[in-house]
Image: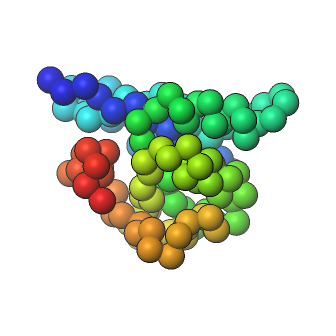
Amino acid sequence: MATKKRVFISFDVDHDKGTKEMLAGPADLPDSPFEFKDASVKEHLTGDWKEKVKRRMENVDVVIVLCGEKTHAASGVSAELTIAKDTKTPYFLLAAYADKNCTKPTSAASEDKVYKWTWPNLKSLIGGSR
């Protein structure tokens, strides 16, 4: 079996926590291409939180930016995406909901696509198809 990719999930802690838990859950499935390593936190990180997130991102293979209805207003998600870009950690944007208007973080590039969340899509995106 191929080595699982280590994943950091960036998400709006105030609005999309349940959805993030549903995303992290499949990491335990035998055919999962990823293992959940870290994610956004609401708790205050002492010191320079951005530096701590940077160190966390340096220890993962890919960042999943979970996009919900209010992601455009989530400054933490925007900062985490900027850190992923700065550390050259591969990332992709994933729609948190199929039936809602999912927005990009403000730091997303105009060409960054928000992908549909399906199991085949997730496997493909984590594998580098984007």
- Asked whether residue 12 appears in the rendered view, the answer is no
Give the quarter of the image for residue 2. top left
- Quadrant that contains the C terminus: bottom left
Residue at position x 25%, y 25% in the image: 3
* Location of the N terminus (image quadrant): top left
**Residue 45 horizontal side relative to residue 4, left or right:** right
Give the side of residue 12 with respect to residue 23, left or right: right
- Quarter of image, res 129: bottom left
Number of marks: 0
View extreme (right): residue = 47
Image vertical order of residue 68 relative to residue 40, above or below: below
Query: Is residue 50 among the parts visible in the rendering?
Result: yes
Q: Residue at x 44, y 74 (%)?
A: 111
Given residues 107 and 11, the one toward you in this image is: 107
Q: Measured along the vertical axis of the image, is residue 114 above or below residue 123? A: below
Q: Is residue 111 left or right of residue 26?
A: right
Residue 110 point in image, percent of width and height: 50, 76
Seen at 31% across and 45% down, the residue is: 126
Question: Residue 82 versus residue 15: which sits nearer the camera?
Answer: 82
